[in-house]
Amino acid sequence: MARYERQAAIGSIANPATEESRATMALADNLQSFGQYGMEQYARMRVEGAQEEAYDVEPGIDAPEQRTSATMTGRAYNDIVMAGHAAAIKNDYTKRIAELSVEHAQDPIAFQKNSEAYKSGLLNGVSPEMRNAVSLDYDAATIRPMAQIKQAHEKGVIEESVQGIVQ
């Protein structure tokens, strides 16, 4: 007799026309929704944990250690660590460009030479996936100082020429 009851239960699930099967399907849908919500909350908590860990990493110009990008937590961690890395790089080279522009205020050739030497050393320590972006941003950051240095150099050359003519 138990065997017959069991088969009847399976038949009621397979036949959605019965009240019993509709209730079972509704329960299954609710459990699935609850499980999915729980997994989403768990994933959110793990991502937040990875982000908190990433905030504890001291940003620097040397390439940071990253986690696998195959997981949500790894990607969340890497995004924050790499943003700190990018900010540290930009702060460092902005400061160095300002120093070089003061040091070589009227010598565009020396500025260019020292600027390129610094850029080369900087790019060696930068994370490989960021090298092109850093290189382009660095080049853009040197345009204005180079123009000012060239202008100062040309002004100095003109003043020397005028002094030579006047004497």
Image (cartoon, rainbow, N blue to C red):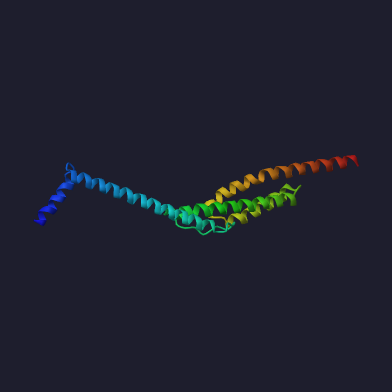
Q: Quadrant of residue 60?
A: bottom right
Of all residues shown, which one is farthest toward the left? 1
Q: Position of residue 43 (x, y in %)?
A: 41, 53
Q: With 72 as the anchor, is 113 left or right in this view?
A: right
Q: Position of residue 54 (x, y in %)?
A: 51, 56
Q: Let me know if residue 158 appears in the view.
A: yes
Which image quarter is the C terminus in? Answer: top right
Residue visible at 62% across and 56% down? Answer: 121
Instruction: Pick the residue in front: 149 or 14.
Output: 14
Q: With 104 as the anchor, is 26 left or right in this view?
A: left
Q: Position of residue 62 (x, y in %)?
A: 58, 58
Instruction: Pick the residue in front: 7 or 119.
Output: 7
Q: Position of residue 139 (x, y in %)?
A: 62, 46
Instruction: Pick the residue in front: 14 or 114.
Output: 14
Picture layout, residue 96 above or below residue 153: below
Of all residues shown, which one is farthest toward the right? 167
Number of numbered discs overlaid on the protein picture: 0
Which image quarter is the N terminus in? Answer: bottom left
Residue visible at 50% across and 52% down? Answer: 79
Q: Let me know if residue 69 appears in the view.
A: no
Residue visible at 55% across and 49% down? Answer: 132
